[in-house]
Image (cartoon, rainbow, N blue to C red):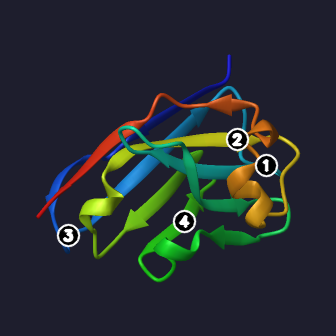
Amino acid sequence: EVQLVESGGGLVQTGGSLRLSCAASGFTFDDVAIGWFRQAPGKEREGVSCISDRDGTTYYEDSVKGRFTISTDNAKNTVYLQIDSLKPEDTAVYSCAVDSYGGPCTGISLVDFDLYDYWGQGTQVTVST
């Protein structure tokens, strides 16, 4: 059974940092792409970052470039999203999802949710002012 479990969310002050984890089971990260998405209350889901093991590409949504860093630890079957310089507008539930085809990661990867086969339940990130 494929499972994605996110963790690492929490309540932080503006300017703080968090490292989110997406632990996978039931498959390996070989040749897949993993996307991170977020959904704030009353807003639509938006993609923030993607990483492809197939070709090594990464992609970031413009508003998070320079503040978010996506990485993988294939030995642990885990994808990380390092979030620095947090802003109140980053408050959302953050979820990861797997694209079994493997990418490449482009802007399409952040908006075409149908690319993704499995989704995690999410972890809450709340940024206080």
Reading the image, the residue beneath label 4 is 70
Given residues 24 and 92, the one toward you in this image is: 92
- SS state under label 3: loop
Tell me the distance, in whole angstroms, between the alpha carbons under discs 2 and 4. 14 Å
Q: Element type at marker 1?
A: loop
Whether tag 1 and tag 3 are in contact, CB under 8 A, the answer is no
Q: Earlier in the sequence, mark 1 or mark 3?
A: 3
Which residue is at a point 41% across and 65% down the rendered structure image? 82
Residue type (three-letter) at the residue carrying disc 4: Ile
- The residue that appears at 61% across and 31% down in the rendered structure is 119
Query: In the image, which is nearer the foreground, mark 1 or mark 3?
Result: 3
- How far is mark 3 from mark 4, CA to CA? 17 Å
On residue 32, the disc is 1
Which callout, 1 or 2, points at the residue further toward the start of the chain? Answer: 1
Q: Residue 125 placed where, x, y %? A: 29, 48
Q: Is residue 54 above or below residue 9?
A: below
Residue 94 visible here? yes
Are dots 1 and 2 in contact, CB under 8 Å?
A: yes
Q: Nearer the viewer, residue 27 or 110?
A: 110
**Residue under label 2:** 98
Is the residue 30 above or below the residue 2 in the image? below
